[in-house]
Image (cartoon, rainbow, N blue to C red):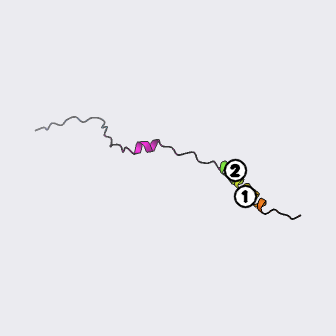
């Protein structure tokens, strides 16, 4: 006695349900990080400012 079987589709498109929090997270982009040259210039400005402040408070009177 042959049993009837329905024809199977050639390709199944079974997708898992999407997590609604994933899509916005994938589209999010991080902010632009500071370049090494900018960081170096910022440290140099701070160093010069500190040197100037120290020199104003304690001026060298040495010849």
**Residue 55 point in image, percent of width and height:** 78, 60
Residue located at (85% from left, 64% from top):
61
Residue most extreme to the right: 63
| For residue 10, side relative to residue 55 (left or right) | left
Magenta-tinted stretch: 14-36
Residue located at (71% from left, 52% from top):
45
Q: Secondary structure at mark 1?
A: helix
Q: Residues within 10 Å of mark 2 (few under 14, many from 20)?
A: few
Residue located at (43% from left, 42% from top):
24
Looking at the image, is mark 2 or mark 1 nearer the viewer? 1
Q: Main secondary structure of the magenta part?
A: loop
Distance from disc 2 to disc 1, alpha carbons, whole Å, reads: 14 Å
Q: Is residue 62 magenta?
A: no
Q: Quadrant of residue 60?
A: bottom right
Q: Secondary structure at mark 2?
A: helix
Query: Which quarter of the rendered picture does the N terminus lie within?
Result: top left
Query: Which quarter of the rendered picture does the C terminus lie within?
Result: bottom right
**Residue 53 point in image, percent of width and height:** 74, 58
- Can you tell which mark lies on residue 41? 2
Taking 14 as reference, is 49 above or below it? below
Q: Is residue 26 magenta?
A: yes
**Which residue is more in the foreground, 56 or 3?**
56
Given contact means CB atoms under 8 Å apart, are the residues at marks 2 and 1 in contact?
Answer: no
In the rendered image, which residue does mark 1 sit on? Answer: 50
Q: Residues within 10 Å of mark 1 (few under 14, many from 20)?
A: few
Q: Quadrant of residue 23?
A: top left
| For residue 46, side relative to residue 16 (left or right) | right
Residue most extreme to the left: 1
**Residue 58 point in image, percent of width and height:** 78, 63
């Amino acid at each position: 006695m042959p049993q009837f079987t329905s024809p199977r589709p050639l390709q199944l498109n079974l997708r898992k349900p999407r997590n609604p929090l994933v899509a916005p997270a994938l589209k999010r982009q991080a902010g632009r990080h500071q370049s090494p040259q900018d960081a170096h210039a910022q440290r140099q400005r701070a160093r010069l400012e500190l040197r100037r402040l120290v020199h104003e408070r304690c001026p060298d009177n040495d010849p």
